[in-house]
Amino acid sequence: MSKLTMSKAINEGLRKCLETDPKTVIMGEDVGKLGGVFRVTDGLQKDFGEDRVIDTPLAESGIMGTAIGLALRGYRPIVEIQFDGFVYPAFDQIVTQLAKMHARALGHVKMPVTVRIPYAGGIGAVEHHSESHEAYFAHTAGLRVVTPSNPDDAYWMLRQSVESDDPVIFLEPKARYWDKAEISAAPVLDLHAAKVVRPGTDLTLLAYGPMVKTCLEAAAVAEQDGHRIEVVDLRSLSPVDFATLAESVKRTGRAVVVHEAPVFMGMGAELAARLTEQCFYHLEAPILRVGGYFAPYPPSRVEEQFLPDLDRVLDAVDRALAF
Amino acid sequence: MTVKSTSRARKKAAPGVPDSARTGQDAPAELVQLLTPEGDRVENPEFPLTVSPEELRALYRDLVLVRRFDGEATALQRQGELGLWASLLGQEAAQVGSGRAMREGDYAFPTYREHGVAWCRGVDPLNLLGMFRGVNHGGWDPNEKNFHLYTIVIGSQTLHATGYAMGITKDGAEDAVIAYFGDGASSQGDVNEAFTFASVYNAPVVFFCQNNQWAISEPTVNQTKIPLYRRASGFGFPGVRVDGNDVLACLAVTRWALDRARNGGGPVLIEAFTYRMGAHTTSDDPTRYRSAEETEAWKAKDPIARLRAHLEKEGLADEEFFAAVDTESEALGLRVREGVRSMPDPDPTLIFDHVYAEPHALVEEERAEYVAYAQSFEGGE
Ligand SMILES: Cc1ncc(C[n+]2csc(CCOP(=O)(O)OP(=O)(O)O)c2C)c(N)n1
Ligand SMILES: [Mg+2]
């Protein structure tokens, strides 16, 4: 495949899902004629019809609840939530029903529902359009939670998510929608595998989604100061590929977790705690965290100060190296 | 017609509902109108309205200034001064008519598009632009003009409005509340729960739905099989469909509904049948999903043109008046332009302000951390 933007890669992934499995349906607000507000579903309704690509009423609980019903009837719904901040009306259905159905039914029913959500900030948007709520989902047993950081992963992880018989929360870093890359001919990794995206020896940066790019840039800058920083892209937030993470951290002896979500009770807390248990005797410094502040996502004119950037990542790298 | 297609059509039709009413699209006869698109006054015995020439001129002025402000904001977005703008173009009469029906003690709960209602409540237009510029998430004190903050999450505010109205009842006060929402929002659970609570508690709240025919790219038929105003009867209160491009009809019907509510009559659903003449927001491209002919057809029902035609026909306003409104409109445009351009970027410590009403240790700790971090850059280069 040629070079594709992340939004186009997901679009192609969805197209493939619709082509290969007649039980897949896409549901969401404005996903039809408009092709979604980010054009991720562009052209799909035209090619697969209104029965497969459904412009739903404006009601997220309704979308989610009926997707569950369709799954019970043997369908494989792919739900689009228009923006991160609008998933909450569907939260009840996701947490109390979608996540628990398989367990409650003792495995007699499956919930192969993929919930696509453009998330995270950095695009200068108004309130509710920039949030990182991955921890809520990762905190809920029964949900798989993944987030690609680049077009190739976006394409293959989407296809793997749709093929999964479990519900998958598929978080799309909207600031990365326009990044371009080549798509591989076949998936290289398991959906839930982490990936070392830059090898190094002195410290491990752990990131996912939108922050992988920031961390790669930080590692490149640190190299000029003689620091060889390893960057690991988590890709999956539930389950987390702790084996890959621990292998890296044991080697480098230092780790910094970076995410946009507030640090307090974020993914970084779980990662730091577990990796400390698993790598205790290899650690040269406490595992540090860089992330958003404990405050509502701010107005866009100050989001740059809220979001971790090169400087804040490097500041934490320096502090970890100085231990 | 083949047998097959007949049975298919039968199957799809909702039983007991006449064909003409099955879509929310075509306005049926029950539309309340007091001013025709040609500018002729018509009477409706259920909604009598006496307006003085002076009031008519004031309404005209409101409509023109609101449109001007809105157009200025759209232009400012294109110039990069605003991140986004949700234009009310075409919906001025629905908003000014309902906004002017309110009394001082009444309270409005808007969506993100009620710039015309804000104008009627006396909110400084510049205050509305802060969130679209990205300097705040609201920026006005809701209680100053009884105009709540804009709510972006579709439908939420209808419940707040209902709760506020329940409070009015508990206080034994004579105020009323108006909750704005859109045709798309009518599908949300929150809105339907608001209808239920308002009905059960007989809350003094008027649900004002601007059916502008579109929820971003989705036409009203994606949300409902019956005209929206008829939803009210299932919840046990009256619903009225009003010509949303007729400022007089909107004024009369909303006044009636608010008075009914304040006198213990309970909620009313008003469906203002109107049209979103512009894009959903400045980020939207409506050419992808609707025809230019449709938009063109609605142009003929323009809310401002019809009031102007009426004023001219009846000799209720002269050239001098129209010229004065135009001058005022220019001045407003200038004030808005200059005001936005000189709006300062907030201090980043705003991130930590007002997260809680009382001190919170973590927020204070992170604020101090941020300040120290920011200072480490100053003069350090
Ligand atoms: C809960 C929620 N879901 C989705 C959105 C995204 N969104 C913003 S406006 C809009 C359409 C609203 O249509 P309508 O209620 O008719 O109001 P209008 O914009 O036409 O005034 C949508 C889907 C949102 N803001 N909130
Ligand atoms: Mg609408």
Image: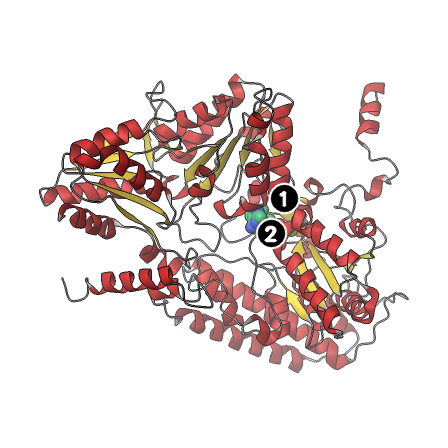
Pinpoint residue B125: horizontal percent, then vertical percent: 53, 71
Q: Which label was assigned to residue B117?
A: none
**Residue at 59% across, 27% down:** A104
Q: Residue furthest right?
A: B45
Residue depicted at x 83% and y 42%: B20
| Residues flagged by tags 2 and 1 on a common chain | no
Horizontal side of B217 relative to B173 (left or right) equals left
Q: Which residue was labeled with disc 2?
A: B154
Task: Inspect this view and state whether residue A50 appears.
Answer: no
Counting from the top left corner in percent of width and height, residue B378 is at 19, 66
Type of residue at label 1?
Leu
Q: Residues within 10 Å of mark 2 (few under 14, many from 20)?
A: many
The quadrant where residue B5 appears: top right
Which quadrant holds residue A75? top right
In the image, what residue occupies the spot 27% across and 32% down? A245
Q: Which quadrant: the N terminus of chain B?
A: top right
Nearer to us in this view, A205 or A85: A205
Please tell me which residue is depicted at 55% across the width and 33% down the height of the picture.
A79
Label 1 CB less than 8 angstroms from ligand 1: yes
Mark 2 touches mark 1? (CB < 8 Å): yes
Quadrant position of the C terminus of chain B in the picture: bottom left
**A240, B219: nearer the viewer:** A240
Chain letter of disc 1 in the image: A
Which circle marks residue A58 in the picture? 1
